[in-house]
Structures are given as C-alpha cells and as structure tokens.
Image: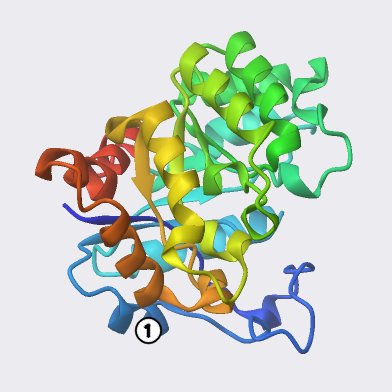
Amino acid sequence: MIVDAQHHVWRIGRGDYGWIRPGSPLHRDYTLADLRPLLGDIDATVLVQAAPTEAETGYLLNVARNSGGLVRGVVGWEDLALRDAATRIHAMATDALLKGLRPMLQDIADTAWILQPALRPALGAMESARLCFDALIQPRHLPAILGLCGRHPDLRVVVDHGAKPAIATGGFAPWADDIARLARETPAMCKLSGLVTEAGPHWKIDDLRRYVDHLLDCFGPRRLMWGSDWPVVELAGGYASWRAATLSLLRELDADSQAAILGGTAVTFYGLA
C-alpha cells in the first residue's frame, strides 16, 4: 500500500485556523475533492489536524468516514493540559479511525512545555489507548522530545517534517546532532514531509539532499514515512514536484526500502487497515 502519511483538509468558514491569514494562498477551502486528482498511485492517506480544537478533530473524522476508504487514519487534537484530558482521550480513542493526537508544539513559546508534570495523565492515556504522538516541532524542541520518549517509553512518537531544519539558510547543526541522538536513543520515527516548505519556494533537489540523506542515515527506511503536507506544499512547488523530488532522492535505495518509506512504515506505525 502506498500512503501519503500527512495531509490536511480545511474549510475556512469553520473559523479555527488562526494561523492561516487572509490574503495567503492557503486562505480558502481545501477538500478531498481537490486532493484526489493529485494522488496518482497513492492508495491511502493519513489526515492530520491543522487547528487546535476538538471540533476540528470531529470534522476530520467525518471527512475520513466519508472518504470511500481513502483516508485510513486521522491524527487529531486534544488539550493535554485539561484536568479531564485522560478521560477525553479515552473517549476519542473509541473511534477506530483516530490514530493519534498532535499538540501544536511549534506554536507554544515554552520549548519544554510537553515535559510539565501536569501533562503526564494525558500522555499516559495516549499510551494506554495506543494513540500515536505526532510531534509538530522545530529543531529547538528535539531535546524535549528526547525527554518525552524517556518518560513515556510506550508512547509511539513520530517527528513531523524532520523537525523543520533551516534548509533555506543552510542550517545543519545542532539540528543534525540532536535528531541523530533522538533516532539513536529512542524508537521514535520521522516523516519525510514539509522539507520543501523549509527550503523555500525556489528550492532545488540538491538543497534537500543533505537533509534527506541525514534522516535516512539516522532512522533508516523502516522508521521513515513520506507525507505530502498538502495543501501547505502548494507554497513550495506543489504536490507533484515534492513527490517527484522524493522519488529522485530515494532512487538509489532498494525496492523494499523505498516501499517502507512510501507506505509500509506508515501502515505499521499508525495501524492502518
């Protein structure tokens, strides 16, 4: 099965996408009907939250239920700091389409927010409910995610967008050292997604190569999964360009390794039917 392990849909009129500013090319509705013509040979997708509300999670689950089998899993959102977060998480987890949760850590000023003791019940509930943790982070958060994995060894963690290295400015360290340590010392996985956005609208494949090769060296193909990050990828060349670049960057890998990155890892990690 070939899987797009991260994309979004949204309806601007729902009103909870505060990060999408009027005037942005993203400030319009993006639906599965817009996505389907772009998919090519992709069989299944994972739909990921883009707003920090329970209401959006419900919206995404409804989209998945009505997708005709295209969307095999949803990564939603919950306020992990609520006193009854654990109860809420267990209730949400009764929906088999919900595969994980994603607190929007990149938007929280406190880099170590996820390590506060008040969140342990919610994180424990995610562990017991077998919900995955999508880490939407920047390089500054990598030490905190290392700490998170140490405190919650049964929490299945995937780093979105390779932790957003500063590709546009050629930034490599300390990102490279920190993500290597995370890969070496924990079972966390990582998404090959969002990299072209970090490279800027005029990226070239060679701009990406050093970063993709490092992620391959650190995680190996069975801990990497490809995602489009559509429609955000439309800001940096579009779906087809990023997919073509990925296939070019992976072409020296054997067929089994390519199959893992392009689908198998996501199927295993998220438990996609």
Percent x, y of residue 200: 62, 69
Q: Which residue of the protein is positioned furthest toward the right in this rendering?
A: 109
Q: Quadrant of the C terminus?
A: top left
Percent x, y of residue 88: 63, 35
Percent x, y of residue 84: 74, 29
Q: Depth check: give the residue in front, 251 or 154.
A: 251
Q: Depth check: give the residue in front, 213 or 140.
A: 213
Percent x, y of residue 191: 45, 44
Q: Secondary structure at mark 1?
A: helix
From the viewer's perspective, is 265 left or right of 9?
left
Rendering quarter of residue 232: bottom right
Write the residue at 35% across / 31% down. Answer: 223
Q: Depth check: give the residue in front, 6 or 80.
A: 6
From the viewer's perspective, is 97 left or right of 184?
left
The residue that mark 1 highlights is 33
Count numbered badges in the picture.
1
Write the residue at 58% across / 17% down. Answer: 149
Q: Amino acid at mark 1?
A: Ala
- In the image, residue 105 above or below residue 195: above
